[in-house]
Image (cartoon, rainbow, N blue to C red):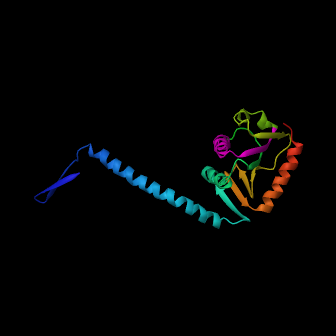
Amino acid sequence: ASHILSGNVKHFNAVEPYRLEEYIKRKEQEVRKQLETANKLIPELAKIADKNRQSDMAEIFIGDKGIRTAYEILLRDATSKDVLYYFYPFEGYHPIASPFYSRLYLFQKQKKVQQRGIATYDFKQSKHYAEISKGVKMKFVDFPLPATMDIFKDKLLIISWENVTGILISSKEIAEHFRNYFNSMWKLATR
């Protein structure tokens, strides 16, 4: 808006409407500059975060976004040579877990990580099993599994979908124990 002073009274006039486009373009340029700055800072901030994330520690993540962050941390340096081991005690459709894992499969596929999962037969008979990539190696058991757990390198992620909470444990020793437990269960499970 512009204004003129006539006596002691300010009279306002609207600026030409085409100026709105200029204003938005200027804001877009500011956001692009901020994004460029952020992209330059992210690698350095990630290094600092990794230094602070020592081994033999645990972190709690709450909510859908929190669990997504836990998976991003878990799979941050994943390569196609790495294997993600997981237990999935499927108990039917869950309004948060089911769509979450559909998106997660795409993320894991993008990381090209190898996957081995043990689930209950209920999962094998569900429509969600059909959504899993054929590259995922799965076996099934007819008894309860301890929890939704992912074991990757030196980390263990335990998830409660009831409370939408994840506990990420960074410990080479604990991850190794659970990987050994997984491998023992793998021998018992069937395709």
At 74% across and 40% down in the image, what residue appears?
136
Q: Position of residue 4 (x, y in %)?
A: 15, 55
Q: Is residue 172 left or right of residue 27?
A: right
Q: Residue furthest front?
A: 81
In this rendered view, identify the residue nearer to me: 131 or 45.
45
In this rendered view, identify the residue nearer to me: 82 or 104.
82
Q: Is residue 87 left or right of residue 2?
A: right
At 65% across and 44% down in the image, what residue appears?
104
In this rendered view, identify the residue nearer to me: 50 or 11.
50
Q: Position of residue 61 (x, y in %)?
A: 65, 56
Q: Quadrant of the C terminus?
A: top right
Above/below status of 99 relative to 40? above
Q: Position of residue 79 (x, y in %)?
A: 69, 50
In the rendered image, which quarter is residue 130 located in? top right
In the rendered image, which quarter is residue 100 located in? top right
Q: Position of residue 72 (x, y in %)?
A: 64, 52
Q: Residue furthest left?
A: 7
Query: How many callouts does the rendering have?
Result: 0
Q: Is residue 84 magenta?
A: no
Q: Is residue 125 left or right of residue 12?
A: right
In this rendered view, identify the residue nearer to me: 172 or 166.
172
At 38% across and 51% down in the image, what residue appears?
29
In the rendered image, which quarter is residue 134 located in? top right
Q: Is residue 99 magenta?
A: yes
Q: Which residues are magenta?
A: 95-120
